[in-house]
Amino acid sequence: MLRSILLFGLITLQMFAMAMLPTELSDSGIIPKPVSVIPATGIFTLTEKSAIIVPDKSVELMQIGQYLVDKLNPATGFGMLVKSSTGAKSTGNIYLSLSPGDEQLGNEGYQLTINSDVVSLIANKPAGLFNGIQTIRQLFPARIEMASKQQGPWEIPAGTIRDYPEYSFRGVMLDVARHFFQVNDVKRYIDLMVAYKMNVMHLHLADDQGWRIEIKKWPKLTEIGGSTQVDGGKGGFYTQEQYTEIVKYAAERYIMIIPEIDMPGHTNAALASYSELNCNEKATELYTGIKVGFSTLCTGKEITYQFITDVFSEIAALTPGPFLHIGGDESHATKIEDYIPFVNRVQEIVSGLGKQVIGWDEIALSTLKPNTFVQFWAKADNALKGVKQGAKVIMSPAANAYLDMQYDATTKLGLHWAGYIEVDKGYNWDPATLVPGINKENILGIEAPLWSETITNIDELEYMVFPRLPGYAEIGWSASSTRNWDEYKTRLGRHDDRFKALQIDYYPSKLVPWSVPLER
Ligand code: TNX
């Protein structure tokens, strides 16, 4: 009896130790799940003599190396440096290099080889190295993410990982119109999404309750339209310099920013700022409630198109990415016979600026230009109309992918008009089979939007975004044939100590076997 108790104790202890310290690379719990992980024998150890080595002093490689150093130095306390060298590899270093020609890896893939001496990361493109670095972070113990010095050892089990994404577009959307989020909050969100290899941030910059980007030709948009938010708080807006700072911060992390100005509906903030945008020449009142579908630009007036041209010209000039998002959703106050020519004309304006249009699925009611993209959120029929016109689709089904939907009936924040989205429901769907007629080849990728009617600050944002975001990241990155909730939930459960190290206020769903016991 005593012997079996002892034995049982030993086995549990051993299991516990295994859970804490993966001894095999294949047991590392990486999210999103890599394409292939082949374990080998041996363990790599980072020490105070370690350095990050790049083959030449190209600014971009040095920056990527510096990014890794900045992630590893605080917790290790090592003060590692990025160095350039093409000499023989020496023990303890991490080598980053571009090695074009491996077609399978594409623009974002990487190959990571770990042996007991060195770690070598190669990719075709810098973005691939950046993604590989996110894997390296996850291979170290979770306390590597902490901001203060922690106890080592800093080990990674040996092996090889080859990895590349299923979809090239893996995004989130943040509504900064209903409640405004400061530049630092947006940067924090960017930092968290890149850890899971997402690569697009769509900013919903204007809605009924607020206009959040400075437009030099139309200054009252921010003076008046930016002056409040839901519940009457003081609102705010990004100056063009601040927006540029966000774009640059994102680009340094291989994130594309997609700016959205929603129109012709969701425009009360603009209509309150300029009387001439209204059909009756009267400025509306500012709006701080959460109803939708009551506002519209005056589609018959020429000044409306001048306004749109000015706004998009200024935003296009600040946005290196190819897309401008024109909204187009819930224009219930616009007659359909006005809506269709409006969307057609706005597409012309955007393409005249050298950009491509993205719009919510309703825009497929119009005649889509060949390079226009449709974002599916509500009506499959609309999205299918887009597909029939040859448009590619961004999948953001509200019932599966809306980060503002509550987890369950007890969630205090968020809405539930599209249902509750527990962590399993958020994970358990396949973009390529969700809507019959929208197939893999019709899909650009996926995006998880966070609407902010009820979300007022970064802590609340984190609570709605985590732990669902890693699931959306995996849906975008890992082939659906390799995904399975029961296996995923155990990997996700092991990310709680990372969430804690990163001080993320996550929702501790009961469906997930968290590795650190919760005070529940
Ligand atoms: C629908 S999603 C909207 C938004 C709301 C959201 C709340 C979409 C294109 N329109 O205006 O904020 O629901 O979940």
Image (tube, grey):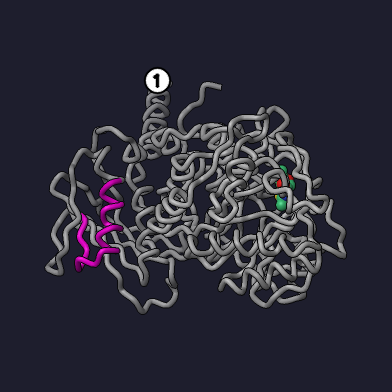
**Is residue 163 highlighted in magenta?**
no
Amino acid under disc 1: Leu
Residue at image coords 42%, 59%: 254
Mark 1 burial class by Cα count in 10 Å: few <14, some 14-19, many 20+: few
Residue sitting nearer the eye, 436 or 211: 211
Tell me the residue that label 1 is attached to: 2
Relative to 21, 363 lies left or right:
right
Residue sitting nearer the eye, 230 or 465: 230
**Predominant SS of the magenta segment:** helix
Residue at image coords 35%, 50%: 24
Relative to 156, 1 lies left or right:
right
In the rendered picture of this protein, how many numbered marks are placed on residues? 1
Residue at image coords 37%, 69%: 125
Residue 275's place in the image compared with 409, above or below, is: below
Check disc 1 and report its element: helix, strand or loop.
helix
Whether residue 485 is visible: yes
Q: What stretch is highlighted in magenta?
A: 52-70
Q: Where is residue 272 in the image (x, y as percent from the top left)?
A: 71, 43
Q: Where is residue 251 in the image (x, y as percent from the top left)?
A: 42, 58
